[in-house]
Amino acid sequence: MRIGILGGTGPAGRGLAVRLARAGGEVVIGSRHAERAADVAEQLVASWPAHPLTVAGTSNESAAGCDLVVVATPWDSAVPTVKPLADRLEGKVVVSMANALVRDGREFVALLPARGSVAASIQSPLPRSLVSASFHHLPASEMEKLDAPIVADVMVCSAHPEATTATLALIDAVEGLRGVDAGSLAQAAPIEAFTAVLITINIRHKVHAAVQLSGYGDG
Amino acid sequence: MRIGILGGTGPAGRGLAVRLARAGGEVVIGSRHAERAADVAEQLVASWPAHPLTVAGTSNESAAGCDLVVVATPWDSAVPTVKPLADRLEGKVVVSMANALVRDGREFVALLPARGSVAASIQSPLPRSLVSASFHHLPASEMEKLDAPIVADVMVCSAHPEATTATLALIDAVEGLRGVDAGSLAQAAPIEAFTAVLITINIRHKVHAAVQLSGYGDG
């Protein structure tokens, strides 16, 4: 499956790109600047010579032509990025992974997007796409280090069961990750906002924490 | 230490009461109806004859006289409950554990209190109390079953370091729980809201999930 990652040159996109590629996905990083995306893709592949990663770099517009598309731009670029691509994204699963956060001293504080979540803000201009929200709570820096083990439960929510199923499949393909269906797109608001808590804990305690659910399918 | 639990006859309060009492705390359940609180306290103690639990029941006003006070009322009763007790709560650590949630079919949806969180709504009429927010993500039904093992990381946030320290000590005293300093009271908004996601997962998957942090202090 070809997976496009819009805004994929940032930390979140890069981390997801290498993990999905390691899991056998054919990943296409998109950027406003196609050349930059090509450079980043080349660097990522070169960084892990032991693993045959398939990662290419191109424009966001081209990346939007993939079978499934992840939006990994900064949160305030998500809508401007997807809006002109609505036709290309029609009928496709579009995964929103951005969080609306602002740094405030030694903390990150969650902002409230007008529609409650970045994911809802993306679904609105893409009424014919199947938007899900996921991948919010994963530490980007650790994701990019393919030799760092990550163990995490990764929540998915969507108004479209087909999008939930496709996103869960992506997650479960990555070693150490377990996908969890967390309900409708209304859950994107608290899932996104909770990222502020995790990053604040990471700053405060100098860790790279991820979320696991105890009492969920483990006994 | 004497711990008062306002609105302690509900599921959240009862679960916390038995776990704190099991950990050696002297717990006083408060209620609008002192007799009801006394009945509930008696039932809780009688339920676990193998454990010498110290749990009493009284009015919210009397419970507010304890050394540390937890607010375990429904979220929309929290402010009306604490406001008339402001003088009794002066200088004390007051732990907010309520979540503003509403059931919507098979999900719970997070509501946004006007001040961003229930905890901030409580701190406002109690300017001379040291409000912290904690205990949101614990499954109440499991908490009340003293023989059910619970393993969870429990986040605490507060504007007052003294409140954070006292709340972390409460948590760490309970077997299976680990307290995590999650920053300022601004983090209460996403911590509270995230409870909607956990309860939705619990409903959807028929589990009693709690949160753990991987990559936090475990290696």
Image (cartoon, coloured by chain):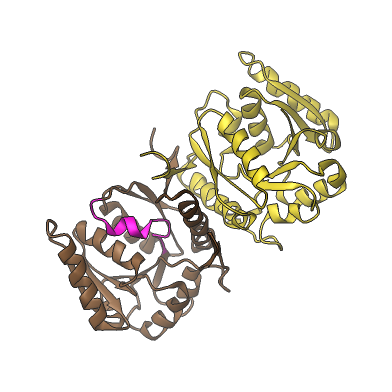
Chain colours: A yellow, B brown
User: Which image quadrant for residue B16?
Assistant: bottom left
Quick one: B131 or B8, which is closer to the camera?
B8
User: Which image quadrant for residue B45?
Assistant: bottom left
Residue drawn at point x = 61 percent, y = 57 percent: A189
Residue A2 to residue B207: above or below: above
Evaluate whether residue A107 shows in this view: no
Quick one: B47 or B164, which is closer to the camera?
B47
Residue A203: percent from left, percent from top: 52, 46
B19 is within the stretch colored magenta? no
Residue drawn at point x = 42 percent, y = 53 percent: B181
Quick one: A204 or B137, which is closer to the camera?
B137
Evaluate whether residue B218 shows in this view: yes
B137 is within the stretch colored magenta? yes
Question: Which portion, as a residue range, is magenta?
Answer: B133-147
Residue B136: percent from left, percent from top: 42, 60
Residue drawn at point x = 67 percent, y = 19 percent: A53
Residue A211: percent from left, percent from top: 48, 43
Q: Going by the picture, which residue comes out furthest to the bottom? A: B84
Q: Magenta segment, principal secondary structure?
A: loop
User: Could you tell me which quadrant the N terminus of chain B lies in?
Assistant: bottom left
Residue B143 to residue B69: above or below: above
Left or right of residue A3, residue B119 in this image: left
Quick one: B144 or B160, which is closer to the camera?
B144
Left or right of residue B60, residue B78 in this image: right
Residue drawn at point x = 22 percent, y = 68 percent: B27
Total marks placed: 0
Residue A167: percent from left, percent from top: 63, 39
